[in-house]
Amino acid sequence: MSATPLPKKMGRPPKPGGHDVLVAGRVPTATAAAIDAYAKRSEITRSEAVRRLVELGLKAKGKAR
């Protein structure tokens, strides 16, 4: 007997390397407003703004040491 091929699954194909990690946290209202303003100026989503700002912060912290 020959093996029958599996049917294709619906939806997005999986990402190489798996899913990204979800990190949730609370920020003060003023900080959220500043993030939203940065996102609007940069024409990106709030999530992308947070990712970029965290990366910038991590790079800046690394340079100080």
Image (cartoon, rainbow, N blue to C red):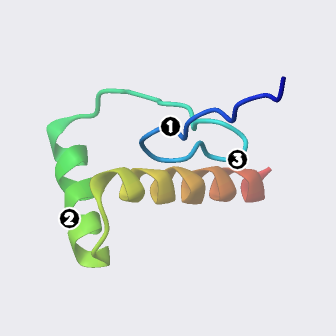
Counting residues from the start of the chain, the first of labels 1 and 2 encountered is 1
- What's the distance in space between the residues labelled 3 and 2, CA to CA? 32 Å
Counting residues from the start of the chain, the first of labels 3 and 2 encountered is 3
- What's the distance in space between the residues labelled 1 and 3, CA to CA? 16 Å
Q: Secondary structure at mark 2?
A: helix
Assign the N terminus to one quadrant of the image. top right
| Residue drawn where x is 42% and y is 43% of the image | 11
Q: Is residue 49 above or below residue 12?
A: below
Quadrant in the picture for residue 41? bottom left
Counting residues from the start of the chain, the first of labels 1 and 3 encountered is 1
Q: Amino acid at mark 3?
A: Pro
Q: Is residue 17 above or below residue 42?
A: above
Query: Tag on residue 29?
Result: none
- What's the distance in space between the residues labelled 1 and 2, CA to CA? 40 Å
Assess disc 2: are there few (<14), some (14-19) or many (≥20) residues with their C-alpha within 10 Å of its C-alpha: some
Q: Position of residue 48 (x, y in %)?
A: 40, 57
Q: Position of residue 15 (x, y in %)?
A: 62, 46
Q: Nearer the viewer, residue 6 or 57?
A: 6
Circles 1 and 3: CB distance less than 8 Å? no
Residue corresponding to mark 2: 37
Q: Secondary structure at mark 1?
A: loop
Q: Amino acid at mark 1?
A: Lys
Residue corresponding to mark 1: 9
Assess disc 3: are there few (<14), some (14-19) or many (≥20) residues with their C-alpha within 10 Å of its C-alpha: few
| Residue drawn where x is 39% and y is 27% of the image | 24
Q: Is residue 26 left or right of residue 13?
A: left
| Residue drawn where x is 20% and y is 65% of the image | 37
Q: Secondary structure at mark 3?
A: loop
Count all numbered tags in the image, as a single digit.
3
Query: Tag on residue 16?
Result: 3
Q: Position of residue 65 (x, y in %)?
A: 80, 50
